[in-house]
Image: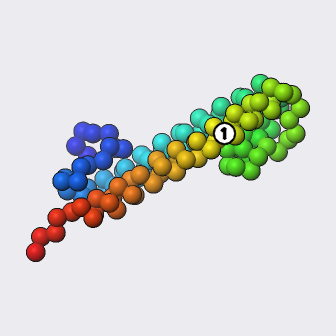
Amino acid sequence: MKHRRRLLFERKHEPLPPKPEFRERMLSAIAACGAAMLAALALGTVGHRATEGFAWIDAALNAAMTLTGMGPVDELHTQAGKTVAIVYALFSGVVFLTVAALFLAPIAHRLLHVFHLDVED
């Protein structure tokens, strides 16, 4: 790569990057997705632990289930816990869309870039 960050894409007049560079870009996207998911999971775990007093493993389980769209496992008893669950559920939807976009962006860009290549006869 030519001294640029891996998630920045080339313009349509630039040549298609080689496959090793595309693999690096995909690995960077996967790492960014993983980091976003871990950060969101940590935020939810701390929120459930602080408001409901769950054990760390139970708080992480509830956060993971909410983050994946399945909803909390344990019943929430406090108003603060229910408020955190509402906000975290809305936040989880945004995280899902963000992670999906981060993952699909290099693939979509490469596909669209192929359509803009000049074909020589």
Q: Dot 1 corresponds to which residue? A: 90
Q: Residue drawn 28% across and 59% down?
A: 113
Q: Tell me the quadrant of the picture where the C terminus can be found.
A: bottom left
Question: Which one is in front, 4 or 108?
Answer: 108
Residue 61: percent from left, percent from top: 76, 42
Residue 37: percent from left, percent from top: 59, 42
Question: Which one is in front, 45 or 85?
Answer: 85
Q: Secondary structure at mark 1?
A: helix
Q: Residue drawn 27% across and 64% down?
A: 115
Residue 41: percent from left, percent from top: 65, 38
Above/below status of 108 relative to 41:
below
Q: Residues within 10 Å of mark 1 (few under 14, many from 20)?
A: few
Q: Residue furthest left?
A: 121
Residue 56 in view, yes or no = no
Above/below status of 86 relative to 114:
above
Above/below status of 15 relative to 45:
below
In the image, what residue type sits under mark 1?
A: Leu
* Quadrant of residue 86 within the rendered picture: top right
Q: Residue drawn 19% across and 53% down?
A: 14
Left or right: 71 as drawn, with respect to 67: right
Q: Residue drawn 58% across and 42% down?
A: 95
Left or right: 94 as drawn, with respect to 11: right
Left or right: 81 as drawn, with respect to 32: right
Q: Residue furthest bottom?
A: 121
Residue 79: percent from left, percent from top: 84, 27
